[in-house]
Structure formats: structure tokens, C-alpha cells
Image (cartoon, grey):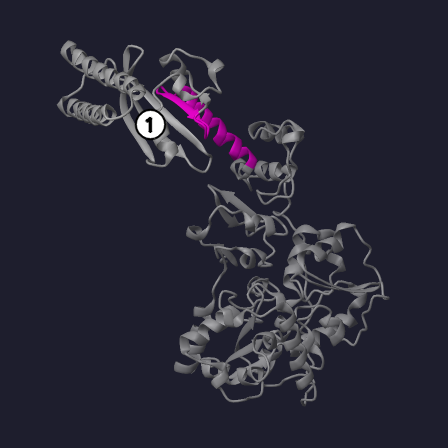
Amino acid sequence: MRQTICTIASNCQDCYRCVRECPVKAICIRGGQARVVDELCIQCGTCVRECPQRAKTVRSDLDAAKSLVAKSLLDGGAVVAASIAPSFAALFPGTLAYRLPSALRKLGFCFVGETAEGAAYITDKSLEEGQAGSICAACPAVVNYVEKYQPQYIDALIPVVSPMIAHGRMIKAGRPGCAVVFIGPCAAKKGEITRPENVGAVDVVLTFSELLEWFAQERIHTEDCIDSSFDRIAKIGDARLFPLEGGMLKTGGIKNDVGQAEIMSVSGPEDVMHLFADKPDFNGKLIEPLFCKGGCIGGPCFADEHISSFDISLLARRNNVIHYADASRNESESRHETNITHTTYYKPTAQEQELVSDSRIQKIYERTGKTNPSNQLNCGACGYKSCLENAIAVARGMAEPEMCMPYMRRLAQQRSDRIIETNPCGIVILDSELCMIQMNPAFQKMFMCNNGILGRRISYLVNADGFEFLQSGEKEQYESIQFKYGFKYHEILYALHDEGQYVGIYSDISKVRFDTRQLDAIKAQTVMHAREFLDHQVRFAQEMAHFLGKSTARSEEIARDLINLYEDEGEA
């Protein structure tokens, strides 16, 4: 069986948002890539909705649906029926809701019915079966959650199928050989039809996103279609409100207000999980849980939210459904009776996870530098609520130590410091005032100094002309060969603008034998100094006498450079 929720690896960008948002932490990280572990996944689709890079996607069954319809039209195969979830009115509001049947028939569906018929039917059966359980089981994500993570409450689930399964069986009971395609906003429905007890009820599940894609491929515009009615096989009543929080209770005519402790409707992952967190006693209560916030209208596959025309708020979706339900309530209805609702649930086997020992957690803490409780920040950047949760996930193979941002930052800093400390080149870092704030051992050895001079200007040790060029903004990088303390050195200087710092890298080239090209470069630099010498002489010869002393000193320095350079060249 193919996995329901998959990862597009090329889109996954190490953000860990899916880990953070997954209510059951069914995301495994390997080599920085996040993938869904099907055995742990409840198919709620939260990761699909939350992934900013669209790296999580619900398996597409569009080709399978198109093949069914094509076979029916071309080869005279079985009639294909469409069962569309009652949340469709949220996506196709107003007049579009009445034109949707025509649009679906243009795709090739011979029967177009509302899944609300199945919703009305299972509501009646659920209330009849109330003694056998107290938690409504219409939401497949809730069923998956209870089976995998709250198995002690399996007996509290009302043993009645979902509206989709009921409606599929109702359609096939009156049309033997008919194929059924369900269309809705739910990812978990794709897995629900593969359960052994449900096989054959529905052939293919499409999401609203897939339906819109199909319409686009066939160039079908709902607004251009004519008004048309859905095919009817059973009563609906208030079941068109089924996709809203409390919709099943409303369908059954049950009043639910704040004063009734025995009747409750909850929606959203947090509220559903809190429902089971305190080990409640569900006896005598009627609970309607829906895993998507606001109900099915908040489903992860409601539509492609990146398409602005379908960016509809949850409140607007709710109002659209209510408006359609009010406008359609007086339609004629028939009654359908058949025993198609009973289902069974499964207790988990492979989903049970090993306990992680304290010693194993401590080893992981040691690796990530968290043995000191003060380093256990519980920042949540890794996607887990605490460092303990992350350590447990690492021990179980669901996470990687590198997911910890503070740990990686410390590691990067340590590696950076280590590179500087062991570099054979002399490295010095200056602040914005050209005062030394850090130097490595190679720099100290080269210029016969120690950390005791930190805080002094760099001119205390070496010629600061290059740094002053950088400071003035005249250059982004400066490179030269200098002679001081009886040896030649090559310097490369550059600025760190964001930090307001300057970096100097020095190499001792006293013993380096230069080839012709390198000598030419050095001579070119000397010629540049000689030209500077001449300009300097002419300029200062015309100025006041006290400047002449400075000119003479500069001239002597340049001349000395020339003498030293060519004396060393002769020795080489």
C-alpha cells in the first residue's frame, strides 16, 4: 500500500516545522531530510498544511479516478459515481454550489451525490449504538489517533462507519457494479478506504485540491456551468452541517451548550489530545471530536492555499456551509434503510515504542553538551517542546543531534576558534578603532608578542597603512609585502562590516625563493613606492619647513625599503 503523506526531498529545507507541528511526532529526520513514518502517522495532514516549502504532500490519486471515468465512457465499464463531502459548500459558495453537479458530470460522473446522505444515516445509527460507545468515530484521523496512541479508549469509540463509507455502500447497494469516487478535504480518507472492513465501499478518494486540478486540466469553470441538482438516494436533514464543529450533534437534533457537561464537541489537534490527556471517564457522555480545527472545513486538502482565489478564511467557510444548508433544507428527500454501518477497531502492535533509559538520555546530553541543566534551553527550535523530548527522539532514531540549534552554534564556534588557533598563518582581529582584540599563536610568534598587548592599536606592532585604507572605506581588501623586524611578511587585510571589525592574515616570506613573476610583482610594488617618493618630495618641497622633516623621514623609509629589497634579492 502506498503511503498517504509523502516528502518531496528536494523541497525539504531543514526548518523542522513539520516536526514542530506534527501532533504525534511521526516525522523522522535523516541527513537533514524529514520523512513521515507511516506506522506512526495518523494522516491528519497537519504537516502538509504547515510546510512552508510544500515539501509534504498528500498522495495523488487523480490518475486512478480519471482511469475509472475513462473506462466507463470509452469501454462501457461500470458507472462511476461521485460522493462529495458536505464541506464542498465552503469551497463553492452561493450559486457555485448549485453548479457543481453539472461540473462533475462534465468530468464524466454519471451519478453525483452528497456524502451528507451518509452523514445523516450514520448519525441515526451512532445514537442508536450509544450504549456501545460514547465517542463519535466519523473522523478517521481521530480513529487513527485512538488506535495508535490511546488504545485504552478503543472500546469507547462508537462502532459505526464514517459518512463516506456509509454513502459509498448506499450508492453501490442501489447500483451493483458501480464505482465510487469520494471527494473531500481530508487526507485520512485515503487511508480509511484501505482498512480491511472498508475495502470495496469506495474505490478512489480525491481531495478538493485534486478536484480543482482536474477542473483546470479539463478547462471546466464552475461559474460557467448551469444549475443542476444532486442525485438523491436518502434523507439529509441537517447533515449538511456535519463538517462543522458540533455538526453531528446538530444533525441528530441534540442541543449542545455550555451547561451540558455530558455532551461535548471538540476540534483541532490540541483539544482532541487534551480530551484524552487526563484519563477521563467517557461513560454516559457523548463526545464528537474532529481532528481539524473548526471541523472538516479546516481540512489540510481543502484547496491549494497558494491560489489566492481559494484563500478563504475559516469563518467564511463556516458561513458558506450554513448558508447552503439553510437554502437546501426544504428539498424533497427519500428514506434509505440498510445495515451497512457496523465497523471494528484495532489495537496497536508495532506502534508501541521502546522506553528510553536515563543512561541513554545522559549519553545524548553528553554528545550535545547538555549535561549541565542550564544548557537544556527547551527552546523548541528542533521541533520538540523540550530537550528531553528531543533526546528521546534521538534515542529512537526519529531525530538527529544536529537538529539542536544551540548545540550546532556552539559546535560552529568551537570549530571556528580551533581553525584560528591552529592556523600556521598569523591572524589578528581588530575593532573599529584598529585596536587588537584577538590574535592567534602564529601571530604572537611572528611578531614576538603575547595577549598582554590586546587593546593596543595595531600600529604598535606593524605598519597600519592597510588597515587605515580599509577604515576610510577606500578599499574592501588590502594586500602588500612588508619588511620589519628583520624579515619580510605578506599581509592580506579585509573588513567585517557587519561586526565592525578588521582581520589581518600574515605569512612569513623571508625564506621564500621567488620566481620571476613574483619578483616582478614585488618590483612593481617598489616602483609604486618610488613614484610615491617623488610625488612626496615635490609636494613637500613647496610647503613649510616643519613639514620637510616629515618628508625626509618618509623618504628615508622608502629608500630603506628599496635598499633592503635589492640587497635580499642579491643574496638570493
Q: Which residues are magenta?
A: 406-434
Residue 227 x, y percent position in the rendering = 54, 89
Residue 392 x, y percent position in the rendering = 62, 37
| Residue farthest toward the right in the current orientation of the protein | 259
Closer to the camera in the image, 132 or 487: 487
Q: Is residue 144 visible?
A: yes
Q: Is residue 536 left or right of residue 506?
A: left
Residue 137 x, y percent position in the rendering = 70, 64
The residue shown at (67%, 75%) is 119
Residue 465 x, y percent position in the rendering = 33, 25
Q: Is residue 244 left or right of residue 411?
A: right
Q: Is residue 368 above or below residue 308?
A: above
The residue shown at (41%, 23%) is 428
- Local crowd size for mark 1, using a 10 Å CA cut-off: few (<14), some (14–19), many (≥20): some
Q: Is residue 317 left or right of residue 459?
A: right
Image quadrant of residue 376? top right
The residue at which mark 1 appears reads as 466
